[in-house]
Amino acid sequence: MQARTTVRVHGDSEHLASRKTVLVTGGAGFLGSHLCERLIADGHDVICLDNFFTGAKQNIDHLLAHPRFEMMRHDITFPLYVEVDEIYNLACPASPIHYQHDPVQTTKTSVHGAINMLGLAKRLKCRIFQASTSEVYGDPSIHPQTEDYWGNVNPIGPRSCYDEGKRCAETLFFDYYRQHRLEIKVARIFNTYGPRMHPNDGRVVSNFIVQALRGAPITIYGDGSQTRSFCYVDDLIEGFVRLMNSPAEVTGPINLGNPGEFTIRELAELTIEMVGSKSKLTFEALPQDDPKQRRPDISRAEAQLGWRPTIPLREGLQRTIAYFDRFLSGRAGT
Ligand code: NAD
Ligand code: UDP
């Protein structure tokens, strides 16, 4: 393991941080790119690993020249040998369209990928964070969802490669914790949105904003009465960092998400209003196994991490709309 040194960060700030070398798998994706940015701002060396299945070089372009940032093209379903102090394991396609495109690879990424990253953490005796998901609760019959709810998951449906892959990854994390005393941090992430979401990955926030900006019909699946809770990316990344830096006994699983709950129809209407769009609503078939309701109980995150989201939906949407407006007009940047 690399020696930790103490450095000054944040320019003239008196704030001191312990400088670490941190591996972020899936670092060129939506969440990964924001996490890499945050870790660099906190004074760490970052190795960003990605196979670019759904990630984009554009997401990390602005980091490439940074002396503490390094990009590595690699697929986590294959073993990896690097020397780092901490691992954030985010690599995995996250939108239903992308994870269902090659479902066998999705399961391999979740399961073989977890085994490879846990093996690496075991050799290095380092902390490892897992980006798990509210999908482990499936179509939940408990509402809001608490971490002790075991879920309602179809093991053989089109979403199962992702849901069961992530559930198996959690099992592996807790077995490495019990069997090898590994320091694990498992976050169950609820729907998160913000700049650098993939414009074509079919997720609801990006779909609606892009449709509204183009004046195209807003595609509501089903009657739009299903609910989701939307967390702005900056809030989530703060939760990641707090969880990683929490005492060793805090293993998770821990829900990270915004407890504000909205129907999909409400989200569509709000997006149209905020964009000032003339788009009309159009109703399409509800995909199989689409969860009817989802909202995190974040009491554990509040108690153990002192964390709760601070950015309301309107404010987060405003920033995300501004990003997609620039993106669609070719003025993307970051
Ligand atoms: P994303 O698709 O933007 O990012 C995933 C990244 O992983 C991409 O850059 C992709 O190229 C990379 N990747 C995929 N398979 C890989 C492999 N085998 N080897 C190396 N890299 C690989 O998605 P995201 O929204 O940033 O999600 C990041 C993580 O957070 C995922 O694990 C996802 O399951 C989890 N998550 C996200 C949300 C959300 O709302 N965004 C919700 C729950 C869980
Ligand atoms: N959805 C929708 N129209 C779209 C995209 C998604 O009505 O254009 C719905 C989808 O059926 C689901 C919700 O929005 O009920 C959230 O979908 P998303 O794919 O963003 O995430 P997940 O289903 O994984 O929570």
Image (cartoon, rainbow, N blue to C red):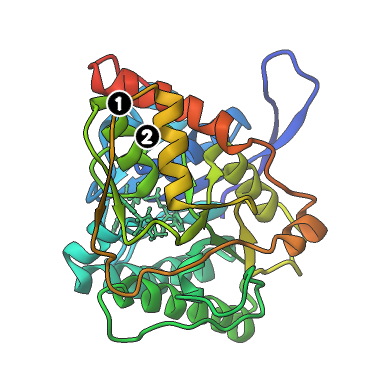
**Label 2 lies in ligand 1 vicinity (Cβ under 8 Å):** yes
Q: Which residue is mark 2?
A: 196
Horizontal side of residue 307 vs 286, given as left or right: right
Locate the C terminus by quadrant: top left
Judge the density around disc 1: few (<14), some (14-19), many (≥20) Cα neighbours within 10 Å: some
Can residue 239 be seen in this snapshot?
A: yes
Can residue 20 be seen in this snapshot?
A: no
Give the residue at x 67% y 15%.
11
Where residue 132 sits: x, y (%)? 49, 65
SS for callout 1: loop
The residue under label 1 is which amino acid type?
A: Lys
Judge the density around disc 2: few (<14), some (14-19), many (≥20) Cα neighbours within 10 Å: many
Which of pointers 1 and 2 lies earlier in the amino acid sequence?
2
Locate the N terminus by quadrant: bottom right
Instruction: Judge whether 257 appears above or below 251 on screen.
Output: above
Q: Nearer the viewer, residue 69 or 234?
A: 234
The residue under label 2 is which amino acid type?
A: Arg
Please state the quadrant of the image where ligand 2 appears. bottom left
Where residue 116 sits: x, y (%)? 38, 70
Question: Quarter-wise, where is residue 55 in the image?
Answer: top left
Q: Which residue is mark 1?
A: 278
Instruction: Judge whether 170 appears above or below 40 on screen.
Output: below
Give the residue at x 48% y 45%.
266
Give the residue at x 49% y 80%.
172
